[in-house]
Amino acid sequence: GAVVSQHPSWVICKSGTSVKIECRSLDFQATTMFWYRQFPKQSLMLMATSNEGSKATYEQGVEKDKFLINHASLTLSTLTVTSAHPEDSSFYICSARIAMRGDHEQFFGPGTRLTVL
Amino acid sequence: QKEVEQDPGPLSVPEGAIVSLNCTYSNSAFQYFMWYRQYSRKGPELLMYTYSSGNKEDGRFTAQVDKSSKYISLFIRDSQPSDSATYLCAVNAGGTSYGKLTFGQGTILTVHP
């Protein structure tokens, strides 16, 4: 149980294009999903918190117009990197919390490796 | 000062050794403490989850939290080559920071046969 998937697992794009990453909770409902970014040999940095049916909350320093987050259903959140540039190349990981559960466990997806040329 | 400090290692041990991984944190508001294991190019996998001070054991893994010294530890007994991974500690304050995790830098562990 508590499986989170991400699609695609890796993507290469040209500078200036937009890329959409999907995060799905496969066997549970997730009212809250989180998006992290991880640079090589560094830890995960929280980018934003995504709540179903409402606007995402972004961490300080994260451009909300560049990283568009949509959480339209209890099992799907999407992250769109708009006008991507080489410095956006990173490992993007989502996580999800099980709805109606009072603890703070998060279940992580396998990550999406983005390379911007 | 980072909110969570973790020695990045790398740490290399022989198979069967006891491994000790540690983190310190600065904010006394943190109440939830977790350890994740991350294999290369994969998402983190939850290993241990504890609330407040004390010990928690699960198989070969033991997590310890000492809130008085703001120190958390993960012990791995009888380490195996399959334990080779990056281990991340994470903390959460609960309340209004519901669900937001702050991670340590991660410790790279290699267990050699």
Image (spheres, coloured by chain):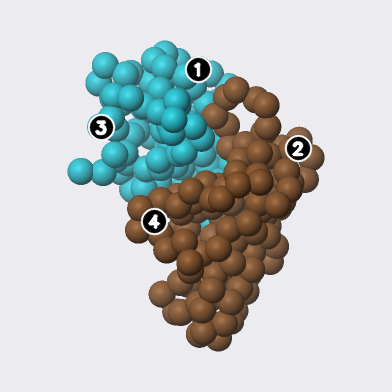
Residue A76 on image: x %, y % = 71, 51
Colour given to chain B in the rendered image = cyan
Q: Chain of mark 4?
A: A
Question: What type is the residue that disc 1 sits on?
Answer: Lys
| Res A10 → quadrant | bottom right
- Front: mark 1 or 4: 4
Q: Establish whether labels 4 and 2 are both on one chain.
A: yes
Considering only vertical position in the picture, is A11 above or below B15?
below
Question: Horizontally, is A32 left or right of B101 in the view?
Answer: right
Which residue is identified by label 2?
A28
Disc 3 + disc 4, Cβ < 8 Å: no
- Mark 4 or 2 closer to N-term? 2
Q: Secondary structure at mark 3?
A: loop
Which residue is identified by label 1?
B56
Considering only vertical position in the picture, is B102 above or below A93?
above
Question: What type is the residue that disc 3 sits on?
Answer: Ser
Which residue is identified by label 3?
B26
Q: Secondary structure at mark 2?
A: loop
Whether residue B80 can be seen here: no
- CA distance for labels 1 and 4: 27 Å
Q: Count neighbours of disc 4 (C-alpha within 10 A) and say few if under 14, some if 14 to 19, many if 20 or more.
A: few
- CA distance for labels 4 and 2: 30 Å
- CA distance for labels 3 and 4: 19 Å
